[in-house]
Image (tube, rainbow, N blue to C red):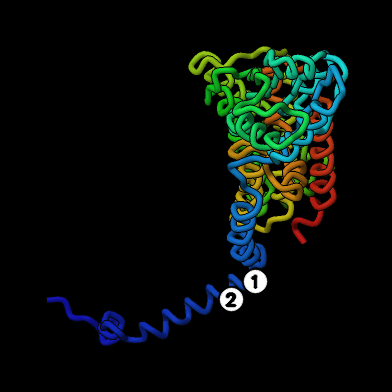
Amino acid sequence: MTHLLPTQTARRLPGNGFWRKTWAVLVKEFIQLKRDRVSLAMIAMMPLVQLMLFGYAINTTPRNLPTAVLLQEHNDLTRSILAALENTKYFRITHLPTTEAEVDQLLASGSVLFAIEIPANFERAVRRGDKPAMLVMADATDPVAAGTALSALGQVLQTALSHDRAIPDSMSLPFEIRTHARYNPAAVTQLNIVPGLVGTILTMTMLIFTALSVTREIERGTMENLLSMPITPVEIMLGKIIPYVMVGFVQASMIIAIGVFLFGVPIVGSLLMLALLSTLFITTNLSIGYTFSTVAQNQLQAMQMTLMFFLPNILLSGFMFPFAGMPNWAQWVGEALPLTHYLRIVRSIMLKGSSVADLHYDTAALFVLMLIAMTIAVTRFRRTLD
């Protein structure tokens, strides 16, 4: 029989200092949490951000969608139709092109989601009862936004024009609405989702890879050795980012290849341009992740910053919900996110065959975001060990 010493017996007795020791650990954790200001801010900010985004920014019934109108004639009837379109709140007339080539360019560049063409002699045909056709072209790369507005168009127009003197009295519209869904006429979900997944997956993986790069060096104690070497912060940053650019390029190639061969997603535009702009997007995300790693004090904080940045990218970029249907303040926030611009780029190249001229705004935006992130990262790098 084994005999225990009195001290060993006291240690094994239940309740002997149990609550005192538990209380000590509890107090220690609260003190550490109080000192970890980043984690404390994340605890407060995460639910607030989610409530704001889901409560105010997300709208599954998009309104005020940018629309171009090509008028072949100007009269009371066409003015009534334009006023009725804007009164529906689904359409916001932003462009008045004069040629069909301008209409094609506006749709290809993503400047408008809808283009409406009213032909010449339209009013005369309505007066005669010939039921002329009004053509409505929709950018169906976002089938949710396009489908909702198109399905409501006929009924809403009839209601809005029912008491208009320019329209003959009738139980139905005196003209025909011909809809043409461009780029994704069958409203196939995969054509919208798969290109978006390229940007979403790259955003998550690239941010995590570089957000942990500097904090990992600090926690392992190897950052001092790195700083003692004759190397500049820019050289360190590029040395850490470039390998992951190659990793991201491989990831993007895999996702696009699976989308093309498994889901039948076309690549209408230039594959070389898609590769170059994807590399720009990857570098932008790596730069932002590297910036997080210079701000964070440990890997946990770096992961928290990554998740905090990833959430608005998913919700405000147009990946899950129509971008044009969000309120103005949410669209302004979305314009500051790399994923917003890359989604437009990848969908436009793959589904529309858009050129560099069509995508100059989103390309420039990605480049500016990359430069801003790199500047902040280099500026803060020397202070990461302070």
Residue found 16% across the figure and 76% down from its top: 2
Residue 334 at x, y percent in the picture: 72, 43
Residue 78 position (above or below residue 268): below
Q: Which residue is mark 2?
A: 31
Is residue 206 visible to the viewer in this orientation of the structure?
yes
Left or right placement of residue 107 versus residue 75 in this view: left
Residue 158 at x, y percent in the picture: 65, 32
Q: Quadrant of residue 269?
A: top right
**Nearest the eye: 230 or 88:** 88
Q: Residues within 10 Å of mark 1 (few under 14, many from 20)?
A: few
Left or right placement of residue 202 versus residue 284 in this view: left
Q: Secondary structure at mark 1?
A: helix
Q: Residues within 10 Å of mark 2 (few under 14, many from 20)?
A: few
Amino acid type, mark 2: Ile
**Nearest the eye: 118 or 103:** 118
Q: Quadrant of residue 163?
A: top right
Residue 343 position (above or below residue 89): above
**Nearest the eye: 69 or 331:** 69
Q: Quadrant of residue 125?
A: top right
Residue found 82% across the figure and 21% down from its top: 70
Image mark for residue 328:
none
**Nearest the eye: 75 or 26:** 75
Residue found 62% across the figure and 44% down from its top: 315
Left or right placement of residue 28 versus residue 271 in this view: left
The reply to whether the C-beta atoms of the residues labelled 2 and 1 are less than 8 Å apart is yes
Amino acid type, mark 1: Arg
